Image: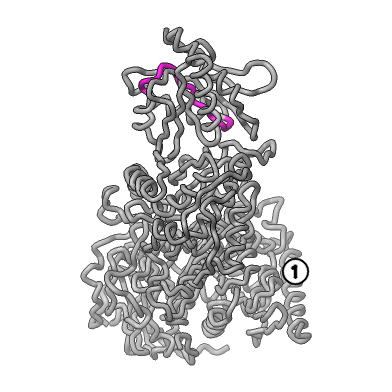
Amino acid sequence: MQDLKLKANENRGLHQLEAGFDLLGWDEVTQGSVLPSFEGDATGIAGLKAEERDYSHHNSYTATVASWRVKKPVFNIDVCIDCQNCWVWCPDSSILSRDKQMLGIDYDHCKGCEVCVEVCPTNPKSLLMFSEQEDLETALSQWPEKKKKEKK
Amino acid sequence: MAVKYDLNEREVWDGNFAASQALRQAQVDVVVAYPITPSTPIVENYGSYVANGYIDGEFVMVESEHAAMSGCIGASASGGRVSTATSSQGFALMAEVLYQASGMRLPIVLNVVNRALASPLNVRGDHADMYLGRDSGWIQMGAFNAQEAYDLALCAFKIAENHDVRLPVMVHQDGFITSHTAQNVYPLTDEAAYNFVGDIVPVDDMLDFSRPVTYGAQTEEDWHFEHKAKQHKALMDSRPIIDEVYAEFEKLTGRKYNRVESYDMEDAEVVIVGLGTTVETARVAAKELREEKGIKAGVVAIRCFRPFPFDQVRDALEGAKAVAVTDRSSPGGAMGAFYNEVAAALYTTESRPLVTNFIYGLGGRDFSIEEAKRIFIEQKAHADAGHITTDIQQFSGLRGPHLGYFQTKRG
Amino acid sequence: MAITSIKNLKEFSTNNDRFEGAHTLCPGCAHSMIVRELMNCTDDNLVISANTGCLEVSTAVYPFTSWDTSWIHIGFENAATAVTGSEVMHKVRKKKGTLKDNDAPVKFVAFGGDGSTFDIGFQWLSGAMERGHDFTYICLDNENYANTGGQRSSATPIGATTSTAQAGTHSYGKKEKKKDIVSIMAAHGSPYVAQLSPNKWKMMAKGFQKALETEGPCFINTVSPCCTEWKFDPKDTIAITDLATDSLIFPMYEIIDGHELNILYRPKNILKVEDYLGAQGRYKHLFKPEYKHIIEKIQSDIDADWARLQRREEARV
């Protein structure tokens, strides 16, 4: 998952959403408080993947809400069946799916709500919550075994 | 292509018809409107121009004035030419959205046919609605007759859509006295009028999908102040552009407009400062008094109420001895707002003329030449005495005992 | 064709998001699930408007925007009017040929919460529906004024406690029945009206596509569970919608041309409403013995509404 190089990563993490932008003077703010989403020509933007887009620094894609999180979802690619449940229900556009495959979590935008873990249908789950401080290797090494179906 | 509309060199139009013809000649793309007396004919006429092919536009009748201005905002942010009209209660219902239009820097032209605000309900002309708009961030221009309602509506598009302005503009005319009184109007040809206004060149166009934009962002204490300051500067900076547009219009028509109009002011000692149709009445009174009594009377009229021409008001009035500022709006427990603004400007002059305030003409009460003369004569008494000899604020043309407030501490 | 049928979730996931992260909606909020799905189910250009509410204050906080399309917010009440103003201008400029790309398809969508849809913006919505503009209005129904801290709206159901319809020693919370917004919108003669839920993502996507493709004013009410004000764990947002659709407190159906009603989802096992109510803190007080009759009332209302929907579907009127 770390292989996915997002173009806007260069800008990422610079701007904490709560901490705000560089605070500009009245002569520098945009006219009418209008915000352009992209730099340059954005025709056909729906056909472009995030890493192919020229986001403007006003696009929240370039911002992060990582500090909201106390727990983080960790993704285990070995268990995942690429069902995309996590993708469709993620409220923070934080499931990195490309070409029908789940690649990982966008930790700049994930708020740790745990919905992805809840909707994951695999056994064991392919997404589990860990402490924000836990490193990924340790988390993966603690992955549970397949659970036997409980008798009803 | 729009069907050709036949015009005579001289037409007999009332103010509403004149304004609607300006909308037709500017080929306004979208009018979103809700009817209210006395402004209704402006949008009715636009609708009939659309219905008969004189305009390639759309007329949208919505369910309230609030929706009318909301629709204008959506349409204007989508890059075309937009206008509507309203009065009084409709203006009040629109008030929330007026601030949004100016905050988003959208070049909407609103024809306001001035009318009193209830309660009690009243359909006649006073300036209560115009005053309600005075902090809304719009440019506000006043027409004193039908010709001016037409001329200024054309100028309004050109000012609003100028990329160095990008602010909405209100063109005011007095309810009934201007809006429903047929007068001679000399229109431009359709070609000349459209060429004067020009094509609109969109800014931050929501329908330009090569550059998606977000309108109406939330700004809290860390950003709001800067945005409002920038907007104020845009209003202040619109002054020379308004002057340029007026000058260009004069070249085309010979009709000259100024943000502050002065009449018989070369040697005037006593002055009435007014807005709207009052100006023409006061001008007649001034002329007659000069002939009858030798009183050096003059009139100063504010053409451009916002941005307020603080410096030009001062220049126009600093040679006067006594100045009566007339407010055609219920002051609601203060001096008239217009008085306060003129007095503040005059306070910064060396001469500091004596300034009094008249509340008059509310709810369409007629302002007569005799009343204007009485006000001039009172000013002459102040001038001769060297101080204000009456209450500083007085109600004029009111039945019942004298109503006035505050006395001078000067002299 | 910019709107293509979505066969399965894998295929759907190849669509690129046009609603970006780092908005400030609460973790687990269903609003963004619904908005993402709307924006992902078409490639067409979109002009989107939003009424004031959680969605609006969380997605356009200066200097950031989470919208990759044209977007406008004016006030609490007028998103329908704002977007239809744009729709009218589009019509004029297309005719005059002054658009940057005159042939590109554009869809016009307005979002509002239940407060702005059922209450303060009701007149603006009704006006826009009556005028017949080509647009889709989507209500994100979380059954309260969540943005201002959980006050009752006319979408709040009987028995829920809110900060302005409080449950207490002498009160079981809101006393009045939820306004039937779907029927009201259908009564406008709208060509397509539906009630949908994000747990049934495919039905919701299909409904969205149908609304976008249908010419004229379309209305969709979506259930948008609010973990903050309904008081449940954010991870359970989808589980709550499962309980909502399977207890039939939130039936999924569409009404075409104001009369042709189709039920979109029939649960195999219809759950008791207690299961739904019991999963949320806002109904906790109803489980006291003295309020048992309120739960019974809610259940009997659901049963009656479900019977009514089925009769309407059968009768085709």
Question: Relative to the observer, which residue lies in front, B167 or B147?
Answer: B147
Q: Would residue B87 appear left or right of B291 to someone viewing this image?
A: right
Q: Which residue is mark 1?
A: C296
Q: Would residue B332 appear left or right of B342 to someone viewing this image?
A: right
Q: From the top left corner, tell me how far across and down residue C231 is, in percent.
A: 54, 63
Q: From the top left corner, tell me how far across and down residue C127 is, in percent.
A: 63, 64
Q: Would residue B123 appear left or right of A45 to someone viewing this image?
A: right
Looking at the picture, which amino acid does disc 1 mark?
Answer: Glu
Specify the quadrant of the image occupied by residue A76.
bottom left
Q: Is residue B326 magenta?
A: yes
Q: Would residue B381 appear left or right of B197 to someone viewing this image?
A: right
Q: From the top left corner, tell me how far across and down residue B50 is, in percent.
A: 58, 66
Label 1 lies in what chain? C
Question: Relative to the observer, which residue lies in front, C129 or C168?
Answer: C129
Q: Is residue C111 visible?
A: no
Kindly identify the residue that appears in the image at 37 percent across and 63 percent down: B201
Q: Secondary structure at mark 1?
A: helix
Q: From the top left corner, tell me how far across and down residue A85 is, in percent.
A: 45, 83
In the image, residue A148 above or below residue B265: below
In the image, residue B64 above or below residue B256: below
The magenta-colored residue range is B318-330
Question: Relative to the observer, which residue lies in front, B361 or C232?
Answer: B361
Q: Is residue A79 magenta?
A: no
Q: Is residue B319 visible?
A: yes
| Number of residue marks | 1
Specify the quadrant of the image occupied by residue B209.
bottom left
Kindly identify the residue that appears in the image at 57 percent across and 54 percent down: B66
Residue at the front extreme? B9
In the image, residue C120 above or below residue B381: below
Colouring mode (rainbow / by chain / secondary structure / one colour): one colour
